[in-house]
Each structure stands twice: as structure tokens, then as C-alpha cells.
Image (cartoon, coloured by chain):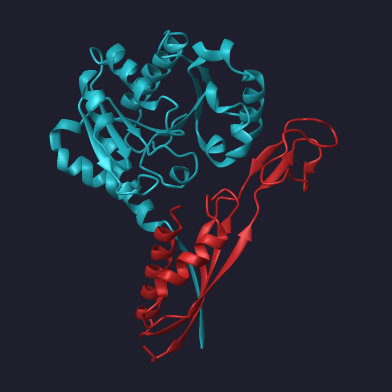
Chain colours: A red, B cyan
Amino acid sequence: MHELGLAAEIFRIARETVDARGGGRLESVTVVVGDLAAVEPDLLEFAWKATVAGGLDEGAKLHVDWRPARQLCSSCGEVPERAEGSWLRLCPRCRQPLRVEGGDELEVRTMTFSEGAA
Amino acid sequence: MTEIDVKRKVLEANASAARSLKETFGASGTLVVNLISSPGSGKTTLLEATARALKDRFRLGGLDGDIATERDAERLQRAGIPARQILTGGACHLDARQVEKALAEEGSRLAGLDALFIENVGNLICPTSYDLGEAFKVVLLSVVEGDDKPFKYPAIFSRAAFTVVTKCDLLPHVDFDLSAVREQVAALNPSAGFLVVSARSGEGMDAWYSLLEEKIAWKREAPAAALVAP
């Protein structure tokens, strides 16, 4: 449960960005979160609400742009089928072991703010 | 309303501290190993045995992350190497800034080592995301935890350079399919090393020590700029 720490970092980055543009009120932040980033989107949104609560940016929205990791088979390419909450061990078509790629994204991608309000 | 492209890593502050740690460890030729596992899988026991086996030939040290008590650092000190506890006050992982602070406070005691072992907070999830400036991560899985863990916690098993199965002396007493674990790890991370050890019986420990000796030698000879283990 380190989502509270992550929410604080997201808020710090967003505030810095707004302040560098002359200040204002934060409206929304979009964060790209990968499958393997060890982040639970619901918990992150909950932590975000707690982070902005009671301040000038209260009510600012957090959007999570979820990026799944990819399962790759050396013969069949990308395998979209997934074991629930986990990974498939073998390719459902040729039975070769699958490789997992990507899904480690954790980035503040875009944000919106209203100028001068804060 | 103004929309801005930000494109900044959420963990940029950690990444910047980790980069600075890597420079420090590169300059001193210190091999840093980040050990990650569930609580009770035997990180401290593995390090106690490692300390006893290698301390006469190498300068070793430990950083022990926990939410409470100084027990682990005390155990490593009794095993004969300098160690420092980092208490996280409830947080489920170590971050690079805590490592920087602890090393700065320890000064020469934990500087210029041949190898520094960072024992992360017992947890297979969050510690995976925080680079501590290490050469590589090692994930431990004890045979009593069950043989389904690599696929249940794919992030750490994908990113650890080595999987170490611990407490293998208990294999006759538990239903733990070693080959299933090996297959899962190979599927998640084809280049990962795989070791099976028991610190208690000594089985497999020579392979672990040889691995560390090889990596310590590599780190000593590698230019300061080399940041990732081969």
C-alpha cells in the first residue's frame, strides 16, 4: 500500500508544473499506470482524493490510463488471453513458454488547470 | 482551462536519488544487491550465513528495512559485518532517499565496501517499483510459501536477476513443485538465474557464494559507468 506516497509525488509534480506556468487551480491529472507497476488504480484514486482534500485543489480529478503488460510467444506473437489476475504460462496455441513485456509505466502524462484561480 | 503535456515519471525523485547512489557505488566499486521477499522467507538468515562465509575475504555491509525493531541489523552485526537498520515507520518498501540518508549518517562504516546487501521490507509487491541504486535485485521464495508465487507476483519475478528458492531442506515435508517454479520464472524472465539453497543445511550455498564472488569481481573491474550487472 504505497499509493499514498505515489499520490503525493503526482501532486508535487502537478503543482510544480502549474506554478511554473504562473499558478492556478488544478483541474485534472492523467497518469499512465502499467500492469507491473504494483499500483492498484482504485487505491491510487482514493489516495489522490485524500491528498487534494481540504486544499485549493480539492476536487481535482485523477484519471488512470491503464496499460496492460503484453504476453509474447516467440512463434505466435502477442497472446491476448490472460489468466485472471495473472499470466498464462504457455502459449494457448503452440504450448511454448510466454514472455512478458512492458507494463512498467508510471508517469504523469497530461494535466489541466484553470489559470489564476489559486 | 489549459491542458499541458507533462510526461514526468511519478517516481522521478526516487530515480534521481538512485542515480546518485549508483554513481557513489560505481566510484567505490561496491556491488549492491537488493533482496526482496515475503516476510519470513529467510533474507536475514541467508545474509547471516553469507556474512560468516565471506567476511574474511571481502568488506561486506548490510542495510535492513523493516517497519519496526532493530533485530535484523543486530543479527548481521552478530554475524560479523557492519549493518544499519532503516525503520520505515509503517511504509511497505525502502526508497532511494532512505538509503542515501542512512549511508550518509553511517559515514565510513558503510562506505567503500566490496558488497552492500539491502534487505528490503518483507513484501513481494511495492519494493519492486523502487530502484535503490542496486546492481541487481534478488527475489527469495521459501518452499513453505507455495509453488504458485511467480505467476501470482509476476512483477518482482520478472525484474529480479536471480530467484533464490530458500529452505530447500524442507522440500520432503511440503508440496512444493520446484520444476513448476523454475518454469514460471523462466517464462517471466528467461535470463534470470535460479538457485536452490538452504542456509540451515548448507545445501546450494556454495553456488550462492560463487555467484557473489563473481559479481564482486565484476564490479571491481567494471568502469564506474557500468550500472547494470551482466
Image coordinates for residue B3, horizontal then vertical, percent: 52, 81
Q: Residue at x 47, y 29 (%)?
A: B230
Q: Residue at x 29, y 41 (%)?
A: B68
Image coordinates for residue A19, horizontal then vertical, percent: 35, 80
Which residue extends farthest front?
A: B173
Which residue extends farthest bottom?
A: A116
Which residue extends farthest left?
A: B108
Please state if B128 lies on the left or on the right of A67 as rendered.
left
Query: For residue B121, what is the image quadrant?
Result: top left
Q: Is residue B73 above or below residue B199?
A: below
Image label count: 0
Query: For residue A50, what is the image quadrant?
Result: bottom left
Image coordinates for residue B51, horizontal then vertical, percent: 29, 18
Q: Residue at x 72, y 34 (%)?
A: A89
Camera-side residue: B149 or B155? B149
Camera-side residue: B39 or B155? B39
Image coordinates for residue B96, horizontal then vertical, percent: 33, 47
Q: Is residue B94 above or below residue B183?
A: below
Please state if A4 lies on the left or on the right of A87 as rendered.
left
